[in-house]
Image (cartoon, rainbow, N blue to C red):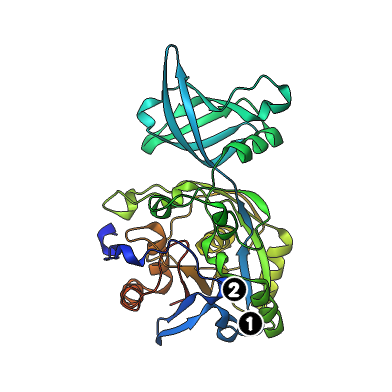
Amino acid sequence: MRVDLFDFELPETSIALRPVEPRDAARMLVVRPEAGLEERIVRDLPDLLQPGDVLVLNNTKVIPSRLYGLRVREETAARVEIMLHKREGADCWRAFARPAKKLNVGDRIRFGEASESTACELVRLDAEVEEKGEGGEVRLRFSLAGAYLDEAIARLGELPLPPYIAGKRPTDDKDLQDYQTVYAKDEGAVAAPTAGLHFTDDLFRRLDERGIARHFVTLHVGAGTFLPVKAEDTAEHRMHAEWGSVSEETARALNEARARGGRIVAVGTTSLRLLESAAREDGTIAPFSGDTSIFITPGYRFKAVDVLMTNFHLPRSTLFMLVSAFAGLDCMRAAYAHAVEAGYRFYSYGDASLLFRR
């Protein structure tokens, strides 16, 4: 499909730079393809679902994956910014470098400061550029591995706010809490599963009282989620792989809930993409552990997910393509036009939508 079909006008004033407080006070646009639009708030979610429905949430935890380093090459040096996006081993990450033109295979990058004390060894970290790909992507092998590397990244890294926020204000201590779900558990994401940012303990309590169960999956969201689609046709766009896991216990519980007539409600496009990657042709969900680069565009036949809760996405993005596949392109164009006109807040810290499958 032509990528320009997924374009729309979005004023700069629509981009949320801070979340609302409390989290579940955000506005939520309910989109039923056959019944139109309804304006609610996230706190209303229990009333919009039915007893027996099941929420599926992504429990990945964001790591401080933006690193600033110094490329050292013979007598010359240059400053570079590294955005980790996918771990490939105990000491190896794929990343996006900026400016990538300053890096060659074999170059060493030094992060942090040298220290005379062995007790402060983790204050400094080195990496070698092993591969260089398209779009600024590089493969880095670090001087530390495993938990030692994780600790060094935690010390030296910066929380990776999306560029449409980071370009307008600096990251601060408040973001350390705001840009993490209340149920984040498994470290490895470099971007938050933002639909989950709306949930609170009180909202979970009310969902429990309504008889709506919840289960967790893990998809470590990569920085590729921020990349624009530069191709003119969706067939020419390449998705970056992300690692995900659906446990045997979770797969069994979801299949049993659906067999009883409950609906699968994906909280966020990351949960949806993982469930659809794990789904069999008959719609049952199998245990899953591995990479997925599933790219969902209109024409895709959904097998696992019945309802999707998600934020409002960028024009021409793979995520707007996904929601257009879920609820219909014309339906979503109309919904987004209404959202802009009605002052909904867009992107990671913005408002939510609740989409029922076409």
Give the camera-side residue of 122 and 203.
122
Residue at coordinates 29% horizontally, 49% vertically from top-left? Answer: 231
The residue at the point 40 percent across, 81 percent down is: 33
Q: Position of residue 191 (x, y in %)?
A: 52, 52
Are discs 1 and 2 less than 8 Å apart at CB? no
Determine the residue positioned at 49% across, 50% down. Answer: 171
Residue 96 is situated, as x and y percent measured from the top left of the image, at: 44, 38
Q: Is residue 63 above or below residue 128?
A: below
Q: Is residue 299 visible?
A: yes
Name the residue that disc number 1 marks: 261
Crowding around mark 2 (Cα neighbors within 10 Å: few <14, some 14 to 19, many 20+) is many
Q: Nearer the viewer, mark 1 or mark 2?
A: 2
Pick the quarter of the image with the C terminus. Answer: bottom left
Q: Which residue is mark 2?
A: 264
Q: Position of residue 201 (x, y in %)?
A: 68, 72
Q: CA distance from mark 1 to mark 2?
A: 10 Å
The one nearer the camera, 215 or 66, is: 66
